[in-house]
Image (tube, rainbow, N blue to C red):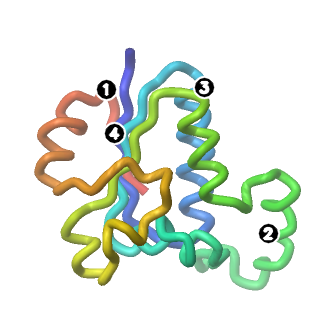
Amino acid sequence: MKTFAVIVSRGEFNNLVQVATLLLAAVGAGIAVRVFFRDEAIYKICPDGADVMDFSEGYRGREAETRERLARLEFANLPGLFRLIKDTGDARFYACSSSLAICGVEPGDLLPEIDGVRGVTAFILEDVAAADRVLTF
């Protein structure tokens, strides 16, 4: 089975939706995905952060319309998208241990869809090393 290792650092809502739609396509095509959330993306894998629909600079002035489109497409619920990905195929989601410490987030604060906390070294040596492709967002 082919595998993608995905490192998610940026924390804007539109970035996480982009990641989720790519992951959904990958698992739907039979590709296993291993995802490592770090830096500001940590806040989006917590219940209170997952609900904040903030956008990158390219969406300035278009936020309201974009929120409506995301809702119509059923892309407005990050935890729901993460569950769908996991229900569709082989997906594992991890939070970076050092990023949790920097962000002041405890493992118990994470969405239930997150499989665990890992160090960056373990992710690199195990998941990145075994992956057919590595993607970063």
Q: Is mark 4 on a helix, strand or loop?
A: strand
Q: Which residue is drawn at 22% across and 64% down?
A: 97
Residue kind at label 1, given as amino acid type: Asp
Q: Distance between the residues labelled 3 and 2?
A: 25 Å
Q: Which residue lies furthest to the top in this view?
A: 1
* Left or right: 130 in relation to 116: left
Quarter of the view holding residue 64: bottom right
Specify few, some or many for label 3: CA neighbours under 10 Å numbering under 14, 14-19, or 20 or more: some
Q: Which of 9 and 105 is in front in this view?
A: 105
- The quarter of the displayed image where residue 39 is located: bottom left
Q: Measure how far apart labels 2 and 1 are at the Cα level.
A: 33 Å
Image x and y of residue 5, in percent: 33, 39
Quadrant (top left/top right/bottom left/bottom right) for the N terminus: top left
Q: Are marks 2 and 1 in contact (CB under 8 Å)?
A: no
Relative to residue 134, is residue 46 depicted above or below?
Answer: below
For badge 2, the amino acid type reads: Thr
Local SS, label 1: loop
The C terminus - image quarter: bottom left
Residue drawn at (79%, 70%) of the image: 67
Disc 4 marks a residue whose amino acid type is Ala
Q: Are marks 3 and 4 in contact (CB under 8 Å)?
A: no
Q: Residue 28 carries which label?
A: 3
Q: Distance between the residues labelled 4 and 2?
A: 28 Å
Closer to the chain start, of discs 3 and 4, is 4
Label 4 sits on residue: 5
Q: Where is residue 40 in the image (x, y as percent from the top left)?
A: 39, 74
Which residue is labeled 2 in the image? 66
At mark 3, the secondary structure is: helix
Looking at the rendered structure, which numbered label has been put on residue 132? 1
